[in-house]
Amino acid sequence: MIHYVSRMQPAFKVGLVARWVMLLLVASSLAACATRPVNPPVKSVADDKMYSFERKGQNEAQAKTLVALAFSGGGTRAAAFSYGVLETLNRTEFVNSNGKKSRMIDHVDVITGVSGGSFTALAYGLYGDKLFDQYEQKFLKRNVQSELIARSLNPINWGYLSSTGWGRSELAADLYDEILFDGATFADLDRKDGPVIAVSATDLATGSRIMFTHSNFDAMCTDLGAFRLSRAAAASSAVPVVLSPLTINNYGGSCGKRMPLWFTPFLNTKNPPRPAARTLERIQELNALMNGGEPYLHLVDGGISDNLGLRGGLDVFNWMEALREAGHTTPFDHVQQIVVVVVNSVSTPKTDWNKSEDPPGTIPILVKAAGVPIDRYSNEQIEYLRDIEARWNAMRSLRDLPAIQRISKKNSNAALEAVRKVPNAKIYTINVSFAGVPDPNERDYLNQLPTSFVLPDEAVDRLRAAAGAALLNSPDFQQLLSDVHARIVEEPTTPHFQNAPEHQEKSPVNIDPGS
């Protein structure tokens, strides 16, 4: 028997080698024809796209409240934590002044997302309430990471991976299509009766935030509607080195795109109002896209430029204030309440580095050096939003004082004008993070969870529960519930946002404080 096996070994080896050679030949042949998906150019763009946050404000002119959710990055940890917030909002019910019941999730107008949070944002935009029946099995409790690794190691994909512009992120996008998005594009979101979904990536060359919105894609003279959701998610979560940049074409300057009208009042102003001055960088980024000087953009993880997905909202608030101060109208002048729920899944794992004389190794240092500035900046963004909230509240209080009203009628100066024209909207800043979880042991557990695309089922369930606990534990959320007379119910009302027929109109429902 031993002699028989030894005689057969060469034949076995020859057969094995032959199979590998055949696979390599197949891979090589695929390399010749492998090309990355190319976003096509458009000859012209409309200035009034329906699928935008600005148009959302105009279309729902009867609505008094705008609700925005911002989902941070953090792999499956972020995806599960943000999903837990959606589940809780699905169980938050209120009755308006007309006696009509609805869920708070029905009134979400926009969801931003980066990296891991982009999956939850895009999936909810695509599936609506059906997500609550599918998301766990399709994505959260799936070992996405091992599937990505297996595809990268499969010789059948080596040809694609070696071709120009087609890297691991394109491989990841194909996987996300198979398991979650089913080939859907942003045009599919446009046809839904749901919130505007705005996920973002980072331009590797400039560090600019690239949002998958009409404003950005119109500036590049390309069609957002034709862009696959899976590629947007792949770009938004393309961690440098681990995953390759995802490349898109920029045709800026070829379609006659103009700067959005609400940007124009301060474009040529030497001394713009301070709120406008703080967002001029955004104008420069859009101008760079429209100039078309860079024909390609190599996109990486959106968390590098905006780990909370909050910068877009801050830009809107600054421009609202600046335009009002300058005497211009905004799409949101009718809004009385703006609710911003920041879902921050940033973890702060404990280390014992300071207990040893020896410093940590090179890799831990690099990881920490990359993560600490992002985390610190994320906290600064939340505090900046709270500063805007406090400033608007204070200015409205001054405006409503009889003495100030009498003075403003007799005298006019820049300071009084700023007070008189402050936006009317009250901002609710609701920060949902691990720090808000009441149980200290649970906080410690959550902070030790890694940033990856695989977690134990138990961790997913605990993240979902923790998100609900942190949201309900937020004093700002409790204040909102009190103001709108909302309550948490075990079973939500009849689902609202399903796969709506194409171009179905949504009837706005007001969240009436004090009703």
Image (cartoon, grey):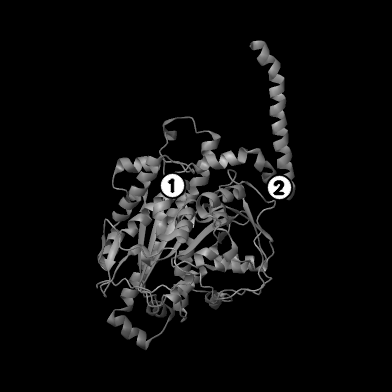
Q: Which mark is residue 403?
A: none
Query: As drawn, is 86 to the left or to the right of 75?
Result: left
Q: Can residue 80 be seen in this view?
A: yes
Q: What residue type is labelled 2?
A: Ser
- Whether residue 274 can be seen here: no
Q: Would you say 213 lies left or right of 41 here?
A: left
Q: Residue at x 41, y 80 (%)?
A: 417
In front here: 393 or 263? 263
Residue 179 image position (x, y, % from top left): 51, 49
How crowded is the residue under tag 2: few (<14 C-alpha within 10 Å), some, or many (20+)?
some
Q: Is residue 59 shown above or below 311?
A: below
Q: Nearer the viewer, residue 173 or 405?
A: 173
Secondary structure found at label 1 = helix
Q: Is residue 214 left or right of residue 86?
A: right
Q: Residues within 10 Å of mark 1 (few under 14, many from 20)?
A: few
Q: In this view, does 412 lie above or below 348?
A: below
- Is the C terminus in the top left, top right, bottom left or bottom right quadrant? bottom left
Give x and y (percent) for residue 213: 54, 65
Name the quadrant containing residue 2. Answer: top right
Labelled pair 1, 2 in contact (Cβ < 8 Å): no
In the structure shown, which secondary structural element does the residue marked by tag 2 occupy? loop
Q: Quadrant of residue 220?
A: bottom right
Query: Could you tell which of marks 1 and 2 lies nearer the N-terminus?
Result: 1
Q: Position of residue 413 (x, y in %)?
A: 42, 82
Q: Which amino acid does label 1 sit on?
A: Gln
Q: Residue 137 carries which label?
A: 1
Residue under pointer 2: 163
- Spatial separation of the CA atoms under disc 1 and disc 2: 33 Å
Q: Mark 1 against mark 2, which lies toward the viewer?
A: 1
**Residue at x-position 47% and y-position 41%:** 454
Placement of the N terminus among the 4 image quadrants = top right
Q: Residue 139, percent across and down? A: 46, 48
